[in-house]
Image: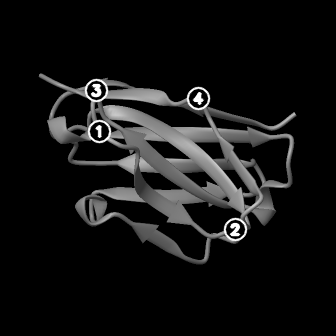
């Protein structure tokens, strides 16, 4: 049974930091590219960051560059998202995604991040 379980979300003040984690099980984690997406109220889901299966390459949405860092630990079947300098526009539900080719595409249930004073 495939599972992606996100954790680490919560309420943070503007300028603060959070580290999200996504624990994977039920598939061969090291074969999959991993990504973080987010969806704010009334908006479409958008890509935040992605990382290749080996962790050798990463990609970020322009508004996250320099503030967010995606990483993975294949020994722990976990992907992380370090988020710094958070602002109100970062408030959203953050989702973990695992993808391998066009067929295998898994999603977590999401974790809420709220940036507010």
Callout 4 touching callout 2 (CB < 8 Å): no
Q: Reading the chain from its start, which is encountered first: label 1 or label 3?
A: 1
CA gap between label 2 and label 3 equals 29 Å
Left or right position of 41 against 39 = left
CA gap between label 4 and label 2 equals 21 Å
Q: Residue at x 73, y 61 (%)?
A: 32
User: For the N terminus, which image quadrant?
Assistant: top right
Callout 1 touching callout 3 (CB < 8 Å): no
The residue at which mark 4 appears reads as: 109
Q: Residue at x 60, y 77 (%)?
A: 56
CA gap between label 1 and label 4 equals 17 Å
CA gap between label 2 and label 1 equals 29 Å
Q: Reading the chain from its start, which is encountered first: label 4 or label 2?
A: 2
The residue at which mark 3 appears reads as: 114
- Residue 102: image quadrant is bottom right
Per the rendering, the mark at residue 53 is: 2
The residue at which mark 1 appears reads as: 43
Q: Position of residue 21 (x, y in %)?
A: 56, 40
Q: Position of residue 39 (x, y in %)?
A: 37, 38
Q: Position of residue 88 (x, y in %)?
A: 16, 35
Disc 4 crowd rating (10 Å Cα; few below 14, some 14-19, many 20+) is: few
SS state under label 4: loop
Disc 2 crowd rating (10 Å Cα; few below 14, some 14-19, many 20+) is: some
């Amino acid at each position: 049974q495939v599972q992606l379980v996100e954790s680490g979300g919560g309420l943070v003040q503007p300028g603060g930091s959070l580290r999200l984690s996504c624990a994977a099980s039920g598939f061969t984690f090291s074969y999959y590219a991993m990504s973080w997406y987010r969806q704010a109220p009334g908006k479409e889901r958008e890509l935040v960051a992605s990382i290749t299966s080996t962790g050798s390459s990463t990609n970020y949405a322009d508004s996250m560059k320099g503030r967010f860092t995606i990483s993975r630990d294949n020994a722990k079947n976990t992907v992380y998202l370090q988020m710094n300098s958070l602002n109100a526009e970062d408030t959203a539900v953050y989702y973990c995604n695992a993808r391998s080719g066009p067929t295998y595409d898994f999603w977590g249930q999401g974790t809420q991040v709220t940036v507010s004073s």
